[in-house]
Amino acid sequence: MTTFSYPFLQNRQPSRLVALLPCVFGTFLLLSLTGCGKQPEGTKPKIGVILPQTGLLGEIGQYEKNAFDLAFDHLQLANRKNFDAVFEDGQSDKKAVAAAANKLAEIDRVDLLVTSTTGASLAAQPIAHRAQLPQLAFCMGSEVARNSPSTVRFYIGVEEEAKAIIEFVEKHYANRKVGLLHASEAQWTMATKDIYRPALDSILQTPLIVEEYDVKDKDFRAQITRLQQSGLDLIIILGYGFEFGPLFSQLHETGFVKETTIVGGWGFLYTPVPADQLEGVYVAGPMYIYEKNLLGVAFDKAFFDKFGRRANFDAAFAYELAIRIPDIMDIISRNGASSLKDELVKQGERAGVFGKYHFSPDGNMIVETAVGRYRSGIIVKD
């Protein structure tokens, strides 16, 4: 594998950099992608990709699919699109994901499986394991990578998000009353049990108060009432974000937000909540949200030019994964799927479109994360 530096990004005047971004992005792709070892000639390897194109998480999957399409365009231009891809709709449903994974493994005979979201990745993992397929899990749950020697999590982890939030609480609210409201989904249920409760119980002077909800819920008043009666100074909210519309309306109706500071993570980067209701909310997320590097700015432009809408951070992660598929397939073909984690660890820190990242020995991507705050509809680094 080749480690790339970016000499063409150095010693540029800021005004010229903006004008040069499209060229810089294209040059970066061509230099980095053509510098990698190519797959041997013959039948192209095949990857299977399961994204939630429909259902509750459909918007997430659509951004991811757009990013894959953009990355494949760039790989084609660099003569590095030396694999075929089969996409399946996970339908935001674990049974549909399992059926799609079985099809990809047994009928399409793919060489690599890519899955999106923690629940879907866990549903597909036994099938990938049985078929001896390496898996790239596009999700927050770290247990997905730990469960298998040939699964890598290619996404910001719940641990990084939790670490940023816990440090925020320790710095500002250690002697105050804190609560946590989370969606009853695998990543947040496990994070609450294994990370938030132990850490916050050791920091806070009063016990952490926890409530949960189903992502299909529309009425959150029971949970809000119990939390409000606890006299909280801070509430941590963990969820997908699409369900925050009615939640925040009810938080405002009850006067909860006038009394309590709100901090959250991933979901606040997707939410349809009006800007005035988000004013002052603290958010933990990847550096891409607050301070984009040159690659991030150029990616945003390329994404907007192709699809006519702004990229979100999910698209940035999907692009980074897709653009590295030739490298990953090369590792697998040379050394086998069991070598993938070790090889990614050896590469050390990299600068991707969403910021700096590296891989832990258990195969989890570790992403530079910070806390920011909504101000006039924009998240500003705190």
Image (cartoon, grey):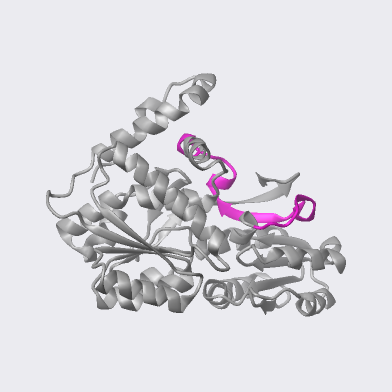
Tell me the residue at 69%/57% (across/down): 272
Q: Quadrant of residue 30?
A: top left
Residue 232 is inside the magenta segment? no
Can residue 175 be seen?
no
Q: Using the rendered view, name the quadrant where residue 360 is placed.
A: bottom left
Task: Confirm whether the magenta stretch covers residue 277.
Answer: yes
Judge whether 376 appears above or below 112 on screen: above
- In terms of depth relative to the viewer, which is nearer, 104 or 315? 104
User: On the rendered structure, is 158 left or right of 182?
Assistant: left
Q: x, y (%) of residue 176?
A: 77, 67
Q: Which residues are magenta?
A: 271-296
| Residue 228 appearing in the image | yes
Q: Say above or below: 154 vs 75.
A: below
- Work out whether 38 lies above or below 143: above
Q: Position of residue 75 (x, y in %)?
A: 31, 42
Q: Indicate left or right for 231 with 162 as reference.
A: right
Q: Nearer the viewer, residue 36 or 87?
A: 87
